[in-house]
């Protein structure tokens, strides 16, 4: 096992005056791919913003990145992190072509606010070619289909030397065929030494490359550990507040049945 990519200790986070994360401790090590699973409102996106450095913990909580226990400048952290989310796609309202969106990954910005060097443009085009979407390089981002735009955002996240890729419900809004093509693309990327955190509330999206699972419930860590130890019907039923039957098939987990909703007010 290598050094840690991100280590969170006893993190409490408030958003809009409400406590969104409560005493969360979690470590992602090199060579691990994590799924973060929980219902809407469980704190998944807040946790990812903490990992990305957009939020900070209070009451003595700590976040460290890339094996360093001392303070790391945020720009240095973001140079090694990639972020993909449906929320980001919906908020990208600036006119931009595909390659310009990808190039904005160098600056962690929505849109380009400074000149792009020839090397950066070449890297953006290469990232698109690597994912087989070079045909979208001059297509206006807002004219792309949901699936096309999501793949462009993935290229944006990978345009620099990404060590940890954060995928916050990246398949939200995608139909089933598009979702499956996107998951195949992610599975291939996982073989290239890029570690991933995949956020979802749909267990069928948890890919074979995922090694560990973290369950969030009401802002707290309900359980965490190796995937096959976590993906039990009893554990999922407790975390998701619904009686579930789960089965593993073709190295993925599938929902076989849904029983009564638990703890319904």
Image (spheres, rainbow, N blue to C red):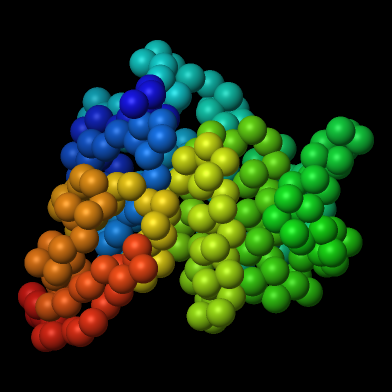
Tell me which residue sits at (21%, 73%) in the image. Answer: 246
Image quadrant in which you'd find residue 92: bottom right
- Compared with 184, 176 (above or below) is below
User: From the viewer's perspective, is 232 left or right of 191?
Assistant: left
Is 137 above or below relative to 109? below
* Quadrant assignment, res 22: top left
What residue do we see at 64% from left, 44% from top? 158
Write the residue at 84% across / 64% down: 135
Q: Does 171 sit left or right of 92 as displayed?
A: left
Coordinates of residue 14 in the picture (x, y in percent): 31, 46
Q: Dividing the image into 4 quarters, which one contains the N terminus?
A: top left
Residue 207 visible somewhere in the drawing: yes
Q: Measured from the top left, where is residue 243 in percent x and y?
A: 12, 78
* Depth check, front residue: 79 or 96: 79
Q: Can I make out residue 199 in this image?
A: no
* Rendering coords of residue 204 (x, y %): 36, 71
């Amino acid at each position: 096992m290598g050094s840690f990519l991100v280590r969170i200790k006893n993190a409490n986070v408030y958003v809009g005056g409400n406590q969104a994360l409560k005493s969360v401790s979690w470590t992602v090590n090199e060579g691990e791919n994590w799924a973060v699973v929980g219902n809407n409102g469980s704190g998944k996106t807040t946790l990812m913003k903490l990992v990305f450095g957009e939020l900070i913990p209070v009451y003595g909580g700590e976040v460290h990145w890339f094996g360093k226990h001392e303070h790391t400048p945020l720009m240095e952290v973001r140079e090694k992190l990639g972020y993909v989310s449906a929320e980001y796609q919906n908020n990208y309202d600036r006119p931009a072509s595909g390659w310009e969106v990808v190039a904005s990954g160098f600056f962690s910005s929505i849109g380009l606010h400074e000149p792009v060097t020839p090397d950066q443009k070449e890297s953006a085009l290469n990232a698109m070619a690597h994912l087989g979407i070079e045909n979208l390089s001059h297509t206006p981002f807002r004219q792309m289909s949901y699936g096309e735009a999501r793949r462009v955002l993935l290229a944006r996240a990978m345009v620099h030397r990404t060590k940890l890729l954060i995928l916050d419900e990246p398949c939200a809004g995608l139909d089933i065929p598009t979702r499956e093509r996107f998951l195949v693309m992610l599975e291939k990327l996982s073989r290239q030494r890029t570690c991933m955190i995949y956020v979802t509330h749909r267990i069928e999206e948890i890919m074979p490359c995922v090694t560990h699972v973290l369950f969030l419930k009401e802002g707290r860590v309900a359980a965490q550990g190796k995937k096959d130890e976590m993906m039990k019907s009893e554990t999922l039923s407790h975390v998701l507040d619904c009686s579930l039957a789960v089965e593993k098939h073709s190295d993925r987990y599938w929902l076989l049945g849904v029983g009564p909703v638990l703890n319904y007010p």
